[in-house]
Image (cartoon, rainbow, N blue to C red):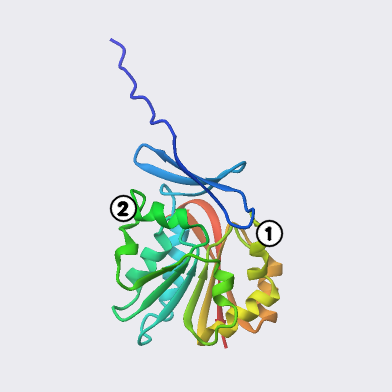
């Protein structure tokens, strides 16, 4: 008797959303119990199957500032909520985590069925969402944050949208440095290494460390996180 194979779940398109500024279109998919967000014409931007490096982005940054009273943190890019969830786990009850998300639909997806995968971090009273470009939020701010975490693209040299280049350039790094409090931490997620970005961080007067991480625990793709401290 031939054993019947269970059919694999089919990928289903749940929603689409335009990225402001003619940045293309995001597509939200479900496959069985898992979700993914893709950019039209490209591959996966993120998936609930693998989020280890997104968790580490927050853990590495927050472990350095968690004991500061009323720590205030800014996350650029909500994604699937895993970085936010890891930050909230790492910080004390008096902390505040501000998330800047450019695409309102991404916030809506996280408040829907996607949120369960990260533990519904948007329901935490310490979390606050600003539906705007993180670059606009950073400009002209002074000593507002103990840590800034950026996961708005695939990294300094892996941009899917040219508008994000400002954040990784000297002007953006200067604005981030001004927005940080003394000994504040900038943590930047990237799909790969980039020696030129490391040098830019040093020129912007950050003390820099580059940390290799894996996409899924000890497995999966090798990603990079820059940890830069304001002197």
Q: Residue at x 58, y 59 (%)?
A: 153
Instruction: Report the number of numbered marks.
Output: 2
Position of residue 8 measured from the top left corner of the image (x, y, whole percent): 39, 29
**Which of the two residues, 26 or 79, is positioned nearer the viewer here?**
26
User: Does the CB distance between marks 2 and 1 fall below 8 Å?
Assistant: no
The label on residue 116 is 2
Q: Position of residue 217 (x, y in %)?
A: 42, 55
Residue shown at 42%/75% (left/top)?
62
Query: In what element is the residue under mark 2?
Result: helix
Vertical arrangement, residue 144 with respect to residue 172, above or below = below
Q: Local crowd at mark 2 within 10 Å, few (<14), some, or many (≥20)?
A: few
Q: Which residue is mark 1?
A: 162
Residue 159 percent coordinates (x, y): 65, 57
Could you say which quadrant of the image residue 127 lies in?
A: bottom left
Horizontal arrangement in the rendering, residue 208 relative to residue 84 (left or right): right
**Residue 80 position within the rendered picture, expressed as x and y whole percent measured from the top left:** 43, 55
């Amino acid at each position: 008797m031939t054993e019947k194979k269970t059919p694999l779940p089919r990928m289903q398109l749940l929603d689409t959303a335009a990225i402001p500024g003619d940045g293309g279109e995001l597509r939200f998919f479900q496959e069985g119990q898992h979700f993914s967000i893709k950019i039209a014409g490209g591959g996966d931007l993120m998936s609930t199957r693998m989020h280890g490096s997104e968790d580490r982005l927050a853990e590495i940054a927050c472990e350095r500032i968690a004991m500061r009273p009323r720590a205030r943190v800014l996350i650029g890019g909500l994604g699937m909520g895993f970085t936010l969830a890891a930050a909230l786990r790492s910080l004390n009850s008096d902390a505040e985590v501000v998330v800047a998300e450019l695409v309102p639909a991404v916030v809506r997806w996280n408040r829907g069925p996607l949120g369960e995968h990260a533990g519904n971090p948007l329901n935490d009273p310490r979390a606050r969402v600003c539906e705007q470009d993180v670059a606009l939020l950073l400009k002209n701010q002074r000593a507002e944050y103990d840590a800034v975490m950026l996961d708005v693209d695939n990294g300094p040299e892996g941009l899917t949208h040219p508008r994000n280049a400002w954040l990784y350039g000297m002007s953006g790094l200067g604005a981030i440095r001004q927005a940080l409090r003394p000994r504040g931490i900038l943590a930047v997620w990237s799909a790969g290494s980039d020696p030129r970005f490391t040098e830019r961080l040093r020129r912007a007067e950050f003390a820099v460390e580059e940390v290799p991480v894996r996409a899924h625990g000890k497995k999966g793709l090798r990603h990079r996180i820059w940890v830069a401290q304001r002197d």
